[in-house]
Image (cartoon, helix red, strand yellow):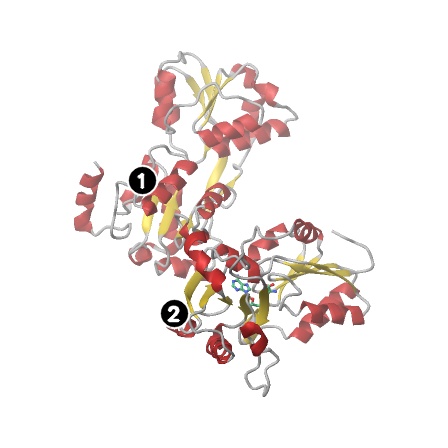
C-alpha cells in the first residue's frame, strides 16, 4: 500500500457485473489501494483484489434509494485524498458513462486532489454482447447511441433530441430507462420510428442472473411491465436485436438460470465454483466446513523427521497432502525427504497437488475411495512395510484398518481438523431454508451433516422441496440418505470435474436419473427410490 503524504483518487471502472470484466489496471490499483469506495453496481467480488487491510466503504445507491448523497461521496473522496491515501473509487461499468464520474472528478480537481480515471467495460456494450446483440452490425446499424432513459419527467422540455435519434439508422441504447420505457417507446414512435422496430431489454447483463426480453418498440413497454422488470437494465432498439436469435450464447449455457449451492470449505471451493460458473450457474457459497491445523503438530512432525523409515505415504485428500508438505517446509526440508518413500494419492486432485511439490505419485487407485485404495494395495507387497497416512481428525479408519489387515504397520497422525463453519449470515440461511435454489452439492459426509445443522433439521423439508442434490461419492451419498436425502446426481468417478460434468448433463436431460421432485423424499418414496438406484 502507498504511504506517500499526497493522496490520489482513482475513478475506476468496475465493469458491468461479470467480475472478470475488469481491466488489469483496475486490478493493480485495487491491490495497492488504502481505501476502496464502492457502490452497488460494482460486483462485491472485486473487493477480493483489495488488500485485506484496506478500508472498504460502501456508498451504494439503488434506484430511488440514495444510500449516500452524491455530495457526501464527493466529500468522502476529498477527505481521504487529503489524508494522503491512495483511494480507489470503484464505479459500475465505465466511470464516465452515466456514472457521475465527471462530477466526482471535478469536485476532486476543485479541492486540489490528484485524480485519475480508469475506463471500464460499460454495460451498454457488454450487456448487449452477453445477450447476443452486437451494438453495431453491417447492414443493421451504422451507429450506436448511448442515451439516458432517466430524464426527469417533470422537465417541460426533453433534452433528448427525439426527432434526431428516431431518424438515425443505428442502435439506440437507453441506460436507466426501465421505469420510463413507455415514454421512450412513445417518443420514438411519435417521431417516426416504426412500431415494429426490434427492441430488447437486458437486466443484470453479464451476471448469471441476466434476463433478456425481446419484442418491438410497440410491445416492449408492456413486456417490461408484465415481467415486472426492475433496474439495472438497458433498453436497446434497432435491427441488431434480431441477431440475438443466432448469437445468444450466454443464456444458452447448460447451467444458465440454475442456482447451485456449494457447501465445500471456502479454501477448497474455488475449483467447483469456477467449473459451475463456466457452465453458466449462479453459485451460492455456503461453506459448511473449515480446515484447521490439528491441536498439535508433534505426531506428524516426528513422522516427517523420520521419513526414511516409512516405505509408503498415502494421501487420502488434497488437504492431507497440503498439510504434510507444509510441515516438510516448516522443518526446513524439501521433497527429497521422500526420496526413499513411495507415494500413493487417492484421487487426481490430490495427485496434482503432490505433483506440484515435485513428486510423481507411484500409485493412483482407479477409483477414489478408501476401499479401492486398499484393493490397489492388495497386489503390492505391503506386509511388514511401514505406511504413513496423514489424515483428518474425523477421517474414517477404513484405510488404516485395511492396510493393517494386509500386514502393514500403519501410522496415521492427524494432519488437519475439519470443523464446522458457522460464519453464515441469517439472510443466507433463510434463503436456503426457503428452498430458493435449484441444487445443493455435497462433497463429503461432513458437508451433508453441517448443511443440515446449519439450516436447522426442521427446515430440511422446505429447503429440499424443489431443489436437487448432488453427492460426490458413495460415502457422501450414504450420509445424505441417513437424512432421507436422495441425490439425483452421483458421478461415476468421484472428482470435482466429474461432479460438475454430471450436473451439466443432468440439466441437459442426459442423466439417467431424472427425479421430478426435490432431493428429500417422503418416507413412502424412499424405498422406491432405492430400488431405482439399484
Ligand atoms: N457507468 C455505468 C452506468 C451507470 S448508470 C456503465 O458504464 O455501465 C446505471 C445504469 O446502467 C442502469 O440503470 C442500467 O441501465 C445500466 N446498467 C449497469 N449495469 C448493468 C447491467 N449489468 N445490466 C444492464 N444494465 C446495466
Q: Is mark 2 within 8 Å of ligand 1?
A: no
In percent of width and height, residue 494 lies at 38, 34
Quadrant location, ligand no. 1: bottom right
- Cα–Cα gap, marks 2 and 1: 39 Å
In percent of width and height, residue 365 lies at 40, 23
Q: Quadrant of residue 335?
A: top right
* Residue plotted at (39% across, 13% down): 380
Mark 2 or mark 1: name the one nearer the start of the chain: 2
* Residue plotted at (32% across, 39% down): 490
Q: Nearer the viewer, mark 2 or mark 1?
A: 2
Mark 2 lies on a secondary structure that is helix
Side of 523 relative to 136 (left or right): left
Q: Which residue is mark 2?
A: 227
Residue situated in front as seen by the camera: 255 or 530: 255
Residue situated in front as seen by the camera: 456 or 167: 167
Q: Is residue 319 above or below residue 429?
A: above
Side of 423 relative to 336 (left or right): left
Looking at the rendering, in which quadrant would you find the C terminus?
Answer: top left
Side of 78 relative to 235 (left or right): right
Q: Which mark is residue 407?
A: none
Whether the residues at callouts 2 and 1 have beta carbons within 8 Å, the answer is no
Amino acid at each position: 500500500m502507498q504511504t506517500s503524504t499526497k493522496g490520489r483518487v482513482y475513478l475506476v471502472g468496475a465493469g458491468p457485473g461479470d467480475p472478470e470484466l475488469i481491466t488489469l489496471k483496475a486490478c493493480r490499483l485495487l491491490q495497492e489501494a488504502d481505501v476502496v469506495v464502492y457502490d452497488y453496481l460494482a460486483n462485491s467480488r472485486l473487493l477480493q483484489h483489495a488488500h485485506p487491510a484496506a478500508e472498504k466503504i460502501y456508498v451504494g445507491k439503488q434506484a430511488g434509494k440514495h444510500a449516500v448523497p452524491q455530495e457526501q461521496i464527493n466529500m468522502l473522496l476529498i477527505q481521504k485524498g487529503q489524508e494522503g491515501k491512495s483511494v480507489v473509487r470503484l464505479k459500475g461499468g465505465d466511470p464516465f458513462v452515466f456514472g457521475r464520474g465527471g462530477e466526482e472528478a471535478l469536485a476532486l480537481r476543485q479541492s486540489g486532489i490528484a485524480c485519475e480515471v480508469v475506463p471500464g467495460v460499460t454495460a451498454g456494450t457488454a450487456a448487449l454482447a452477453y445477450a447476443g446483440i452486437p451494438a453495431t452490425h453491417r447492414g443493421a446499424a451504422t451507429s450506436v447511441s448511448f442515451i439516458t432513459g432517466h430524464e426527469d419527467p417533470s422537465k417541460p422540455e426533453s433534452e433528448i433530441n427525439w426527432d434526431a435519434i428516431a431518424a438515425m439508422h443505428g442502435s439506440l441504447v437507453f441506460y436507466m430507462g426501465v421505469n420510463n420505457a413507455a415514454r421512450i417507446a412513445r417518443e420514438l414512435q411519435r417521431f417516426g420510428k416504426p412500431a415494429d422496430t426490434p427492441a430488447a431489454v437486458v437486466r443484470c447483463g453479464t451476471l448469471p442472473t441476466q434476463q433478456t426480453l425481446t419484442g418491438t418498440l410497440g410491445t416492449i413497454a408492456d413486456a417490461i411491465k408484465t415481467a415486472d422488470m426492475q433496474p439495472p437494465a438497458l433498453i436497446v432498439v434497432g435491427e441488431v436485436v434480431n441477431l440475438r436469435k443466432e448469437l445468444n450464447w450466454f443464456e444458452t449455457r447448460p447451467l444458465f438460470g440454475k442456482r447451485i449451492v456449494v457447501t465445500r470449505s471456502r479454501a477448497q471451493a474455488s475449483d467447483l465454483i469456477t467449473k459451475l460458473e463456466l457452465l453458466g450457474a449462479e453459485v451460492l457459497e455456503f461453506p459448511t466446513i473449515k480446515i484447521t491445523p490439528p491441536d498439535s503438530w508433534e505426531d506428524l512432525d516426528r513422522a516427517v523427521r523420520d521419513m526414511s523409515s516409512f516405505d509408503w505415504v498415502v494421501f487420502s485428500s488434497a488437504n492431507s497432502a497440503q498439510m504434510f508438505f507444509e510441515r516438510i517446509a516448516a522443518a526446513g526440508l524439501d521433497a527429497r525427504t521422500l526420496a526413499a518413500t513411495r507415494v500413493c494419492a487417492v484421487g487426481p486432485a490430490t495427485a496434482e497437488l503432490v505433483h506440484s511439490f515435485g513428486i510423481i505419485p507411484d500409485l493412483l487407485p482407479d477409483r477414489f475411495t478408501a476401499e479401492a485404495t486398499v484393493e490397489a494395495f492388495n497386489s503390492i507387497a505391503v506386509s511388514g512395510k511401514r505406511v504413513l497416512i496423514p489424515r483428518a481428525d474425523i477421517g474414517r479408519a477404513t484405510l488404516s484398518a485395511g492396510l493393517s489387515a494386509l500386514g502393514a504397520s500403519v501410522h496415521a497422525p492427524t494432519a488437519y481438523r475439519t470443523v464446522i463453519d458457522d460464519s453464515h449470515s441469517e439472510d443466507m440461511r433463510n434463503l436456503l431454508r426457503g428452498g430458493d435454489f435449484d441444487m445443493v452439492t455435497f462433497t463429503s459426509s461432513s458437508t451433508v451433516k453441517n448443511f443440515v445443522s446449519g439450516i436447522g433439521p426442521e427446515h430440511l423439508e422446505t429447503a429440499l422441496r424443489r431443489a436437487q442434490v448432488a453427492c460426490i461419492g458413495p460415502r457422501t451419498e450414504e450420509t445424505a440418505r441417513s437424512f432421507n436425502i436422495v441425490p439425483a446426481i452421483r458421478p461415476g468417478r468421484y472428482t470435482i470435474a466429474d461432479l460438475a460434468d454430471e450436473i451439466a448433463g443432468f440439466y441437459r436431460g442426459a442423466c439417467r436419473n431424472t427425479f421430478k421432485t426435490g432431493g428429500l423424499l417422503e418416507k413412502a418414496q424412499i424405498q422406491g427410490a432405492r430400488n431405482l438406484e439399484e
